[in-house]
Amino acid sequence: MFSFGALISKKPGVNLVSYKQEFLTNYKIAYPIVLGQVAHLLVALADNVMVGKLGDAPLAAVSLGNTLIYIALSIGIGFSFAITPLVSTAQGQENWTKVKRILDNGVFLSFIMGILLTALLIVAEPLLFYMDQPAEVVELAIPYMHIVSISMVPLMLFQAFKQFSDGLSLTKHAMNAAVIANVINVMLNYLLIYGEFGFPKLGLVGAAWGTLVSRIIMVIIIYISLSRKPSLHQQFKGPIFISKTDITKILSLGFPTALQMLFEVSLFTGAIFLSGMLGTKHQAANQIALNLSALTFMFGIGLGVTATIRVGNQLGKRNFSYMKQIVKSLFFMVLVIEILFMCLFFIGRNYLPWIYINDTEVIQIASHLLLIAAIFQVSDGIQVFLLGLLRGLHDVWYPSLFCFISYWCIGFPLAYYLGLHTYLSSMGIWVALLIALTSSATMMFFRYKYLVRRISM
């Protein structure tokens, strides 16, 4: 889709061998982020399997409750992303006092955001009655959603510490906390859903309690891990300093970043509802394609966050020549990985759906969707990478505008028309997703080129 030469210099003496160290550094930063994200997805899959054994209604209730929860999550996580570029830039400037101020104010704002999101979700619970869902499903979804809503507070605190440590390139701490907490989550779900080993049999509510407890544990683990690190004693000791200036900086980056996440997540949520309007089999096929695409998307996120960290760090050092070299190495990695995923989806489109279901018609629909998903692997990977790259440059408002235009001015109207008013059906929805992602990637690419020209002047 993009010319590799546009990002990789053609100057004599510049070749892939010269980027070997950059590839290694990128890998060391990115892989803990990817593993942590994949762990969350696998736990969600395990949750669905365990809840699914309770029956169709509980499983549908989890899906319904999570529809609103995921939207809130996108806002909260997007907001916390602002901490990473600020920390990495301050580290590049070797301004450790500033790093501490960002940590203090980032944790404070994330705590407030967690409370606000909890309140918002609780207030939004009655909306479930207006989504044309079975009454039994709604009655099960509300207590589940109520408890998971409370877990937004510890989750946002975890995100604050995670983004802080990511900004310092210490990505393993969040990965370790996430993996341990997710294992505990699965164990608690088993004990509380089914009432094993003397624990109360709470059914669907047991899964919600497992999520809440595991998220509290996750915060405790990452806090202890970071506070005990000798190089970070200065950041975790001494009085907490809440500054209006630092709060304004975090908000100025966090608010538009939250909008970026909201626009993208809400488009894919809209795709779920549109698929549901086409029938159960189309919705099931859509869920299969989305789940597989979400797994590969985690690799793009990992390299996108790596771009935020490394670019932000060089921005603080004002080393723009080396920054461009880092960008080239990351772009190459994204391109290679996404082409591999494209081939995997293309070759496995008729076989991968069998992992989820044994319905021939659903598998046939899903295989068609995976063919389109194979094509948009490159667009999806590049757009999330460029989003992280621009965030590292503290450029967030234009990317937010690009996301809005791509996903809601182009993507959703196309998905509605192609999906519900043409013979393409669910394939039309995914064609629209492909066009939206490609549009987003294209606009962000030209935005990056514009910023690079400004930096080079």
Image (tube, rainbow, N blue to C red):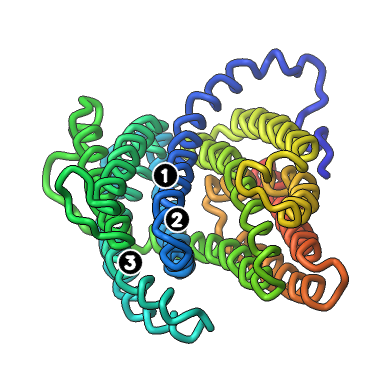
Query: Can you give x and y, in whole percent of width and height, for residue 323 in the image?
Result: 60, 33
Q: Earlier in the sequence, mark 3 or mark 1?
A: 1
Circles 3 and 1: CB distance less than 8 Å? Answer: no
In the image, 404: left or right of 431?
left
Query: Can you give x and y, in whole percent of width and height, for residue 126 in the image?
Result: 38, 84
Circles 1 and 2: CB distance less than 8 Å? Answer: no
- Look at label 1 and name its amino acid: Val
* Residue 43 - label: 1
Q: Earlier in the sequence, mark 2 or mark 3?
A: 2
Q: Earlier in the sequence, mark 1 or mark 2?
A: 1
- Look at label 2 and name its amino acid: Gly
Does the image show residue 252? no
Mark 3 crowd level (few <14, some 14–19, many ≥20, 10 Å Cα) = many
- Does dot 1 land on a helix, a strand or a loop? helix
Image quarter of residue 140: bottom left
- Look at label 3 and name its amino acid: Tyr
Q: Which residue is mark 3?
A: 144
Q: CA distance from mark 2 to mark 3?
A: 14 Å
Mark 1 crowd level (few <14, some 14–19, many ≥20, 10 Å Cα) = some
Q: Which residue is mark 2?
A: 52
Query: Can you give x and y, in whole percent of width and height, for residue 447 in the image?
Result: 70, 53
User: How many marks are shown on the rendered structure?
Assistant: 3
In the image, 400: left or right of 211?
right
Residue most extreme to the right: 423
